[in-house]
Image (cartoon, coloured by chain):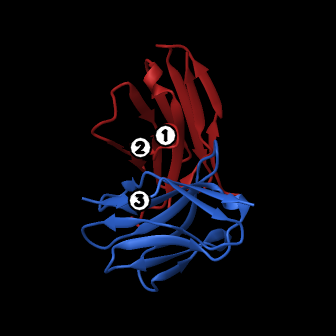
Chain colours: A blue, B red
Amino acid sequence: AQSVAQPEDQVNVAEGNPLTVKCTYSVSGNPYLFWYVQYPNRGLQFLLKYITGDNLVKGSYGFEAEFNKSQTSFHLKKPSALVSDSALYFCAVTGSTLGRLYFGRGTQLTVWP
Amino acid sequence: DAMVIQNPRYQVTQFGKPVTLSCSQTLNHNVMYWYQQKSSQAPKLLFHYYDKDFNNEADTPDNFQSRRPNTSFCFLDIRSPGLGDAAMYLCATSGDQTYNEQFFGPGTRLTVL
């Protein structure tokens, strides 16, 4: 069965500092991994994904994620956080069935000035 | 810009009074999804369409129905809303590969009085 875990409900970081939002996964077969961001009262926005190839994936708004097969992790990172990055972040993995996206429970990121 | 549109953004209904939420897309994607999301939890997949093929999640209540009259439009019908159905309802679309990311609409927030 496919699943992802986001071990932190909340991450707090000062503006200008690097940020990391953690995600680990469990899949059968090749993992297709995603990060989405959700601002209050809005839908989810796609940030980046890992399909295959380079373990470091670059995405929107300066975010990147590192795929680590041995640790089954796909942590989201940004070198310098902005207050506007404050939002709810979801890690997700697809299953073998088209249309089935397994979400983590989400991590609320707060960047304080 | 290609996009996913949901109407209305906010819907108030009475307990037991049927309600229909709509979603349209200009992306020409084959796959459309309906999710339910409650108070900063992960979105929960209700059902999805691959073209005209309807796929219901096993735990989606019978109270929820869906229609997809054409590629661009999809509707969510809640036949007899209960207080527990108050939530954000998200529509999403994707291409027809498992590794395609999903594009989300802004959501409809449903209130049940």
Q: Mark 1 belongs to which subunit?
A: B
Disc 1 target residue: B37
Mark 1 residue type:
Gln
Q: Secondary structure at mark 3?
A: loop
Q: Residue furthest bottom?
A: A54
Disc 3 target residue: A7
Are the two marked residues, 1 and 2, in contact with CB atoms closer than 8 angstroms? yes
Q: Nearer the viewer, residue A6 or B18?
A: A6
Q: Is A24 on the left-hand or right-hand side of B41? A: left
- The crowd level at tag 2 (other Cα within 10 Å; few <14, some 14-19, many 20+) is some
Task: Say which mark, if any, is on residue B44.
Answer: 2
Snapshot quadrant of residue A61: bottom right
Mark 3 residue type:
Pro
Q: Choose mark 1 or mark 3, whichever is in front.
A: 3
What residue appears at the point 32 percent right and 41 percent down from the top-left corner? B57
Both on one chain, marks 3 and 2?
no
Q: Is residue A31 visible?
A: yes
Mark 2 residue type:
Lys
Q: Nearer the viewer, residue A16 or B109?
A: A16
Rounded to the nearest whole Å, what is the CA distance between mark 1 and mark 2?
6 Å
Both on one chain, marks 1 and 3?
no
Q: Is residue B81 visible?
A: no
First reached walking from the N terminus: tag 1 or tag 2: 1
Q: Choose mark 3 or mark 2, whichever is in front.
A: 3
Q: Is B48 on the left-hand or right-hand side of A48? A: left
Q: Mark 3 belongs to which subunit?
A: A
